[in-house]
Image (spheres, helix red, strand yellow):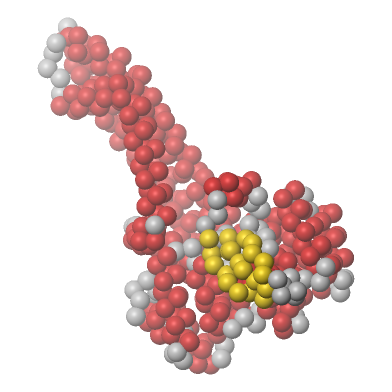
Amino acid sequence: MPYFHYKARSENSETVEGTIQAASADVAAEILDDKNLTILDLTEEKGTFFQSSLKIFNRVKVKDLVIFSRQLSVLVSATIPLVQGLRVLVAQTVSPVLKSIVSEVADDVEGGAKLSAALGRHPQAFSNFFVSIIKAGETSGKLDEVLNYLADQQEKDYDLNSKIKGAMIYPAFILTGLFVVGALMMIVVVPQLTEVLEETGAELPTSTKILIAVSDFLAAFWWLLGLGIIAFIAGLKVVIKTKAGHYYFDYFKLKIPILGKLFQKIILVRFTRSLNTLLTGGVVLAKSLEIVADVSGNEVYKKLILNTVREVEDGNPIAAAFLNSKEVPLMVSQMLNLGEKTGRLDDILDKLSNFYNREVDNMVSNLVSLIEPLVMVLMGVAVGLLVSAIILPMYNLASSL
């Protein structure tokens, strides 16, 4: 989350400066306003290396956040005073990081701060999306309803992410195992087998010569291969951190055969579900789209959604930009257009979210079913190459003796 440097005027007309961490400039401005500071200047700055390193240790697990949201919604619905409810959650929270954060939030609320502003001071736990929903609930006087709806949506997001991660564990484990075993075979086992063939002086097949060359290279320069992989990953991360590199990397992911469609459907689930949550919570359409742009997690869709924000602010339909984009299915654009015309955009978004959620479930199940035979084919090809390159020459040599 970004850091903001501010210059402000206090109630005593004194000029104060400092740095504050918040999910966005709007949240930072609200925090300063709660401190009775009149903002003179507010600029985003990059956090120090030390501050960035602390994020690794101060992360809050999604599961803990889901539980927190559900428990808070229950307490607020039971008309328990907010500060008292937060104190109860402090005692019930298992995560040490979240326990400390909730305790600070309770202190801020008890001191007169709004819940949204208090949560906004901890962007490592509560995103701009989360804070905006809470703020909308406070404004509309329906905080209990908004919290309950937010908890429902977070649980759905958590279930979806858990399902996808769980489905990818098996193929990732198998492919990693194949890579490790293959590397050990080429570096340790194959040189011992090919040494026998080379000592005979017989003419070796082309496949055997290639295998010997690859094995010799890996045995002598395995460290170079390791450095190459590390350098490639590091270079890729550097490129992705640039604006253009991040955009083209996300564009490339959408074009990967089969997986590209899965990524697209996951993004559409996030977009429709998050936008529906914000609109139901009472956030205006233009502001909702700005928040959803960051929630999408893809620069291609972020750019498209931000273009939609400008279209909406100019008085055009929400589907105006989507209709001209190849990245958005025509059905989505048409249904959004229909929902806006009939005044039932939230219902349409809910139906789209459920539809694409089922599509993601089906694609993940099909991919898992497809990966198992694919792994068997790869193992068969590897064994076939090994047989043709080593076993057959050794068999022919034994037959000729």
Total number of numbered discs in the rendering: 0
**Residue 7 visible to an observer of this rendering:** yes
**Quarter containing the N terminus:** bottom right
- Residue 145 location in percent, x, y? 74, 77
Out of 390 and 175, give the one closest to the viewer: 175
- Residue 366 location in percent, x, y? 45, 56
Q: Is residue 247 above or below residue 385?
A: below
Task: Residue at 54% x, 64% y: name it.
Answer: 44
Task: Residue at 25% x, 27% y: name it.
Answer: 214
Question: Could you tell whether 82 is left or right of 41 in the image?
Answer: right
Task: Residue at 61% x, 47% y: name it.
Answer: 54
Q: Is residue 347 above or below residue 28?
A: below
- Residue 229 location in percent, x, y? 36, 37
Out of 377 and 221, give the one closest to the viewer: 221
Quadrant position of residue 9:
bottom right
Q: Is residue 305 above or below residue 166?
A: below
**Quarter containing the C terminus:** top left
Q: Is residue 353 above or below residue 2?
A: below
Task: Residue at 18% x, 16% y: name it.
Answer: 396
